[in-house]
Amino acid sequence: MSRFATRRLALAAAALITLAPAAFAQAPIVIKFSHVVATDTPKGNAAEFFKKRAEELTGGKVKVEIYANSSLYKDKEEMEALQLGAVQMLAPSLAKFGPLGVKEFEVFDLPYLFDNYAELHKVTQGPVGKQLLDKLESRGIKGLAYWDNGFKVMSSNKPIKTVADYKGQKMRIQSSKVLEAQMRSLGVLPQVMAFSEVYQALQTGVVDGTENPPSNLYTQKMHEVQKHVSVTEHGYLGYAVITNKKFWDGLPADVRGQLEKAMKEATDYANKIAKEENDHALDAVRKSGKTEVVVPTPQEKLALKKLLVKTHEELGARVGKDLMQSIYKETGFDPAKL
């Protein structure tokens, strides 16, 4: 039996145990919530907050088990595990839905699409965001909420102060055609790899650098193996909290309502703490003395923005030009005015 077939068999076996909550009326309904980042991150803390409120609001009818730091499944495995019912909840980054066939989510990877959280939330908390989540249902997935992580910085073991500095560097990215185009526009050689493998790749020189919100950079100790960080805030990293649709639809109505309330509270909490945690992490990186943190001048940032925004037109057909225009309308962004 192939390794792939063995893995699918194992996932299917796990699914039989947990997929149908109604089968064991006396036992708590178990929600396995798997994610790939540290507990002490915006997503990690929000997941713990959801666990606490879900268990409180359901009066113990639901038990939430959190598996952080890729301890249960890695990037490439977790989506399949959810679809098979081996886990019930994930919060993958929005880039993860492109390989699933819902390429519209890659619109969030477009560089400089949002200048601040207020613009972002007009989309994620409005009709455009809901329409995108609805597209997941045909894949057996129910979208519950968007959680912020934050705006990304660039890091590298080579200087990255000006646009010219990026040329020829090898940078890790998530699997996203938009992020690939973004990096290529800088003359970067993009390297796709799982989040759990990045620290070692940076340490051994397999890649020169990467992009992350500061909280991910700091909690994964990447700053210890990166000499330079540039506070470019060039792109957004967020998550969609998702569940197995069959599992969700099979929950008792009262329990589902209580979980929806817990998710709403967790979302408000996640989005409240995202900026402060990233600010704290960036300050900690500075104080570590291991990494030089630079803030591009307005002129340097504008040069970077003009170059990267060209990818909007290049990738419009992939993510959907109508979708892109809908977001421009919500945020007031006009690339022609750069």
Image (spheres, rainbow, N blue to C red):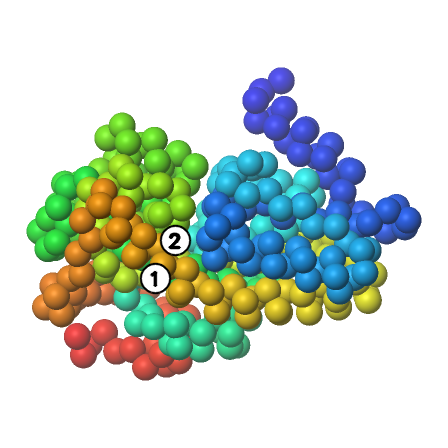
How far across and down, in percent of the image, does residue 249 sit? 76, 59
Residue position for label 1: 279
Q: Which mark is residue 215?
A: 2
Q: Position of residue 288 (x, y in %)?
A: 27, 46
Mark 1–mark 2 contact, CB under 8 Å?
no
Would residue 1 be visible to someone looking at this image? yes
Classify residue 73 as left or right of residue 175: right
Numbered disc 1: secondary structure: helix
Judging depth in this view, the residue of 251 and 328 nearest the camera is: 251
- Amino acid under disc 2: Ser
Residue drawn at x 57%, y 22% is: 3
**On the rendered image, what quadrant is the C terminus found in?**
bottom left
Marks 1/2: CA–CA distance: 8 Å
Q: In which quadrant will I find the N terminus?
A: top right
Residue at figure coordinates x 27%, y 37% from the top left:
225
Residues 25 and 140: in front is 25
Q: Is residue 318 above or below residue 19?
A: below
